[in-house]
Amino acid sequence: MTADAVGGIWSYALDLARGLAAHGVETVLMVLGPPPAADQEAAAAAVSELRLLTPSLPLDWLAEGPEAVRAAGCAVARMAVECGASLVHLNNPALAAGVQFPVPVVGACHSCVATWWKTMRSGPMPAEFAWRSDLVSRGYAAAAALVAPSAAFAAETAETYHLLARPLTVHNGRHATATAASGDAAVAFAFTAGRLWDEGKNLIALDRAAARLSLPVLAAGPTEGPNGARIDLPHLKTLGRLSEAAMAAWLRRHPVFVSVARYEPFGLAVLEAAQAGCALVLSDIPSFRELWDGAAEFVSPEDEMAVADAIRRMLCERGRRARFGVAARERARRYSVEAMAADVFRIYRRVLRNAVTPAEREVVV
C-alpha cells in the first residue's frame, strides 16, 4: 500500500492496515513524499502486521514531471515483487499510469487536482495540473477496482474522468482516540484542524468569521505546505501540527468543531471530532451532507457572516451544543475502522478472484 505523511491519507492507511490485520492481511506501507514525523513512525510501529518503508520517492502532486511519477510507480511495482504482495493498494493512483504491476491494483480516489480545480477555479487547468490529471486518469483506467470515501466524491470523480462506472463507495473509518469525556472547557471555543494552507479547506473564510467573534477559534495543522503554499490567519489561534495525542486532548474539551471547506471528499478531522462528541458546524457541500445530515449545523462556505453566527450560537447555547455533540457521536459510529476494513477486504477478495494474471508478469523498469 502507498501513502503519504502530509495529510489524512496517513491516518487512513494506518487505520486500514490495523483493520485488515484482523482479516489476516499483512501490509507493507510505502510512504512517498516527506518522511513521517517521529510520532507518526511510533504510531505505525504500534500497528500489527504492518511494515513501514520510507524510500524517498516523490508524491505525484509534488513531482517535477511525469517521468518522476512513473519512476516512483516502477519502484512500487518492484517492491510488490520483492515482498511477494498479492495485491497493490494505491492511495496515489497516478502511480499506475504507464506501469505494469505484477499483481492487481486497487486505486483509492481520495482527492485529485482535476476535481480540486473544478471546485476551486474556472477555466482550463494550467499545464502543471493538466499532466497530473492525465496521470490520474490513466492510473484509474489501469486499476482493477476504484474506491472513494463518499458517494458524492465517487460521483464527482466518475463525471470528471468520464469513468464507465463510479468508484465503489467505502466510507472512511477512524480509530477513535478522544472518546473519553472530560467535560466542556471552562471557556467555550471553536476548533478546526487540517492542512490549513490548502485553499480547499477555506481557512480564509473561517479567519474572517473569527474576526466577528469574541470567543477564540483555534486551528491545528500546518500553515505552510510542501508545495510552497502558505497562509496567514491573523484572527485564528494557530497551533501548528499536533500529534495524535495532542489532538485528542483538545477534542476531549468538546470545542465546537468547524469546517467550512469548499473541497472535502470526506474529512477525517470531522470524524475525529464527532467521535469525541464535539458539536459540528460544517459547510453545506455534498460530501458533508451525505455523511452528517441531521447531525451537524450547515452553513454556506461563502457566507462568513452566517459562519460566524452559526459558531456563535453553538458556543453560546450550551444545551444546543450538547445535543449536536450527542448527534455527532452517534452518527460517527457508522464510520468505524471495522466496517471500512471489512468493505475493503471484500473488494480485495473480489478483485483477486477475478484477476487474470500471467504466471510471470513483466515489471517495467
Image (cartoon, rainbow, N blue to C red):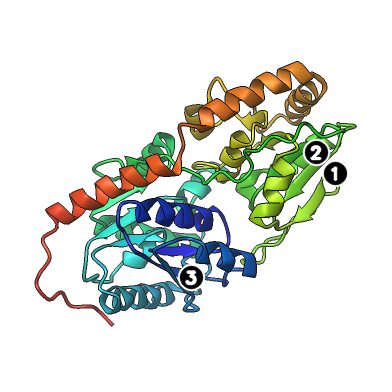
- The amino acid on which the numbered mark 3 sits, given as a three-letter code, is Leu
- The amino acid on which the numbered mark 1 sits, given as a three-letter code, is His
On the image, the x and y values in percent for residue 287 come to 49, 34
User: In the image, is residue 8 above or below residue 339?
Assistant: below
| Residue 112 shows in this picture | no
On the image, the x and y values in percent for residue 263 come to 55, 42
- The amino acid on which the numbered mark 2 sits, given as a three-letter code, is Arg
Quarter of the view holding residue 49? bottom left
Q: Residues within 10 Å of mark 3 (few under 14, many from 20)?
A: many
244 left or right, relative to 152:
right
The residue at the point 36 percent across, 56 percent down is 21
Separation of residues labelled 1 and 2 (CA atoms) = 7 Å
* Residue to which mark 2 is pinned: 208
122 left or right, relative to 242:
left
The residue at the point 25 percent across, 73 percent down is 84
Marks 1, 2: nearer the viewer: 1
On the image, the x and y values in percent for residue 22 come to 35, 51
* Residue to which mark 1 is pinned: 235
* Residue to which mark 3 is pinned: 32
Task: Describe the element under mark 3 as helix, strand or loop.
Answer: strand
Q: 162 or 217, which lies in front?
A: 217
State the count of labels.
Answer: 3
Separation of residues labelled 3 and 1 (CA atoms) = 34 Å
Task: Describe the element under mark 2 as helix, strand or loop.
Answer: helix
321 left or right, relative to 211:
left
Residues at circles 1 and 2 in contact by the CB criterion of under 8 Å = yes
User: In the image, is residue 34 above or below residue 12?
Assistant: below
Image disc number at residue 160: none
Marks 3, 1: nearer the viewer: 3
